[in-house]
Image (cartoon, helix red, strand yellow):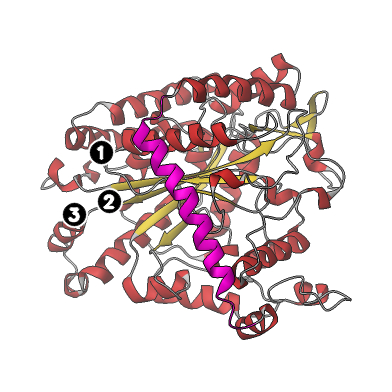
Amino acid sequence: MSQPEVISQSILPSWVDSTLFKGMLRGIERESLRMQSNGFLSQADHPRSLGSALTHPHITTDYSEALMEFITPPKESIPEALNFLTDIHAVVHGHLENDEKLWPLSMPCMLDDQEENIRLAQYGSSNIGKFKTLYRHGLGIRYGRRMQTISGVHYNVSFPDHLFEQLQQHETDEALKKLSLQDYRSHRYLGLVRNFIRLTPLVMYLVGSSPSVCKCFMTGREHQLLPLIKGTLFLPYATALRMGRFGYQNSAQKQLGIHYNNLEGYVAELQKAVNTPYAQFSRLGLNDENAEPIQINDHVLQIENEYYSLVRPKQVPQAGETPSQALANRGIGYVELRAVDVNPYSAIGINEDTAGFLEVLALYCLLKDSPELLDAEQDVIELNQAEVVNRGRAPNAKIQQAGQEYPLNEWIQQHVTAMQPLAEILNQSYATDLYSKALLEMQKRIDNVDETLSAQVIEDTTQQGGTWNFGSFMANQHLDFYEQHVLSAETLAYFEQLAQTSLQNQQQLEQEKEISFDEYLAKFR
């Protein structure tokens, strides 16, 4: 086994100074299932006192009625983003009914044998509301409802334009110098995306925390998982089963050939997938025997968001735009890092160490050379991901790169060492030590595999007597945290107002129906 190539320590250009990173923004999206006091998935409606899941900007639902999603606005520092996320959790906790709690793990536990008992999210009687529920129905018949109960954390990050302006001025390639700022920014963000894909095995090892699953999740599925303890299955060295073949997978999407080498190509490939029929989905039919629609269409993707990717280039859509149209019109505005498990030890699913690490990693991916990512390399990356998902904590875990094999630990160490100067410059930008502390925490996980979140989850699941007991124990601990978090009168009033406004906005949409839902759907189809 050879040594990984030594990564040049000069990834940080000499002309860069810490002021260039002022103006970075980050936002966090965290998903969590509502569980009943008996541990089963909630069958109750989304609490009306929290407002409308259709129109609320911070508190909504994802696939099922019980899968809550909390969204912070873009914030100027990590503490501000985490504080806002904490406020959301405390507000939600105050409005949950019948002793319901938030389930703290990425992988669900408390599903019964009947998939129909995983209720689809409901958004009211407006055309857009019905469309969103139909999309979820389509996901259910395509991939099964169980797969849609997995929770994750999405970390959104953007860099300021003055950084891109400076990077462009220092380019040696004349063609890159001539690009508009919008096109140059998109070019650099796509480089970040490609590098993040290459480095996802590192993310899975360092912050993966789904090494085991509740047996109920595997009902009716063939698998090679082993019993850990009554009711819990695992793999001895797994890190993030959520990111593997039992998590978000889509065989149809494998054939899409969506690449991140240029924005036009990415947008065209995504739009093609939304317009290309797929035989397996055509066989399911568009409507049931009562002529009720069961999926939006029979295409590879019903809508663009169905594309399950580890990272997404994003632009905020304006009224009437699809995500890809927004990208085509205004270029990439930020990236969404999606390969992040929920941290069960944090009451808000993520802590400062993970946030700091992800931002250093994003900057590293932005500045590091990023050649085109073609199919042959993508195949190798998928092998690396499977290796780390299933056996990342094994002493002989390996990474393949450019025809060579390296010990996983050494490969991770090379990259984390090369990130150190970036952590230091971000510390200077924000007058903090948060970023270097985050890398110090990751270093502990490299030095000692038992310090990884996945190892801790296995140990605690065993000690507590299974996934359900461990999850319930952590959920109860988090209750205390929410109750001790003091919400200011201003924050309470803000969320109270949003709840009211969102309900009014939903009502307005429901009164505006100019065409029937059948016509609305026919136009989309």
Sequence-first tag of 3 and 1: 3
Q: Mark 3 points at which residue?
A: 163
State the extent of the magenta-drawn residues as a range: 486-515
Q: SS class of the residue under badge 2?
A: helix
In the rendered image, the residue lying farthest to the top is 463
Q: What residue is drawn where x is 54% and y is 52%?
A: 381
Sequence-first tag of 2 and 1: 2
Please count the marks in the image: 3
Say if 226 sits above or below 470 in the image.
Answer: below
Q: What residue type is labelled 3?
A: Leu
**Could one spot residue 257 in this view of the protein?**
no
Sequence-first tag of 3 and 2: 3
Q: What residue type is labelled 2?
A: Leu
**Could one spot residue 184 in this view of the protein?**
yes
Q: Mark 2 points at which residue?
A: 367
The reply to whether discs 3 and 1 touch (Cβ–Cβ < 8 Å) is no
Q: SS class of the residue under badge 1?
A: helix
Q: What residue type is labelled 1?
A: Leu
Left or right of 227 in this view: 130: left
Which percent across, then down, holds residue 181? 21, 68
Q: Which of 162 and 9 is in front in this view?
A: 162
Which percent across, then down, holds residue 232? 78, 29
Q: What residue is drawn where x is 49% and y is 55%?
A: 502
Q: Quadrant of residue 493?
A: top left
Q: Which of 97 and 128 is in front in this view?
A: 97
Q: Mark 1 points at which residue?
A: 422
